[in-house]
Image: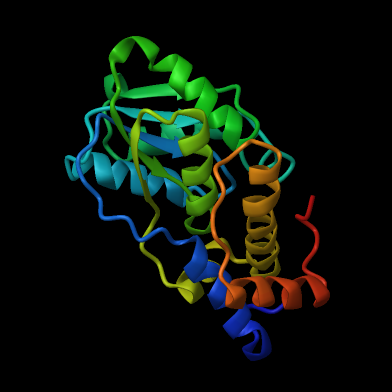
Amino acid sequence: MPESLPDDLRADVQALWDYHDMRHELRPADVGIGLGSHDLGVATHTAELFHAGMFPLVVFTGANAPTTVERFPRGEAVHYREHALASGVPDDAILVEPEARNTGENITFTRRLLESRGVRSVVLISRPYQQRRAYATCKKLWPEVDVVCASRPLPLDEYIASIGDVDRVITMLVGDTQRITVYAERGFAVPQEIPENVADAYSRLVQAGFTERLL
């Protein structure tokens, strides 16, 4: 496994990375929702945004997926909460949704959890390459809420270094790109335009063998 992004893949991986960054301008919201995954940086950034006054309430959502069960055996949301507590977020500012096993359930179950709180605006905090899929899913399943997306502001190479696994990052990028189209077709998310350069980069990376996360 290479320790850094190979030069012959760089342009295509960067194209997918840039595509999934929604480039939303952050604004204060009623709640910050940390979407569970293998990336503890989601919890880190959620805590940072809480301390910056972007929202007064945090929800961490996520049970386990095959990619997270070894790292977070008690569930993604539970481990995220513990990380946020260690980062100084007060316990009474955190809610945990421990059942969701995919992004659709993250949104649906969190919406249900917050039903009595009159939430009108949310910040979705996710892995950088999950932003577009999270946004499209939220717009489909919680259309009345005002949503912006956020992730740790790391360049591609720094993010790969933080995860420590080049192939994993590439396969996840490829998988999330496929899901933009497939999930819209299945009614799980609103459609998102895929530019030609992104579609071409995706095809080349599939041909190069980064298919582990394809549906």
Question: Looking at the rendering, which quadrant does residue 13 occupy?
Answer: bottom right
Question: Looking at the rendering, which quadrant does residue 21 occupy?
Answer: bottom left
Question: Looking at the rendering, which quadrant does residue 63 occupy?
Answer: top right
Q: Residue furthest left?
A: 53
Using the image, determine if residue 119 lies above or below residue 46: above
Whether residue 89 sits left or right of residue 203 in the image: it is left
Whether residue 97 sits left or right of residue 151 in the image: it is right
The answer to whether any part of residue 97 appears in the image is no
Image position, residue 181 (x, y; %): 66, 53
Residue at 21%, 45% (x, y): give it: 27
Image position, residue 35 (x, y; %): 49, 39
Residue at 47%, 58% (x, y): give it: 128
User: Where's the N terminus, which quadrant?
Assistant: bottom right
Using the image, determine if residue 193 lies above or below residue 56: below
Q: Nearer the viewer, residue 166 or 117?
A: 117
**Callout count:** 0
Using the image, determine if residue 174 lies above or below residue 111: below
Residue at 74%, 73% (x, y): give it: 203
Whether residue 38 sits left or right of residue 136 in the image: it is right
Image position, residue 153 (x, y; %): 36, 63
The answer to whether any part of residue 12 appears in the image is yes
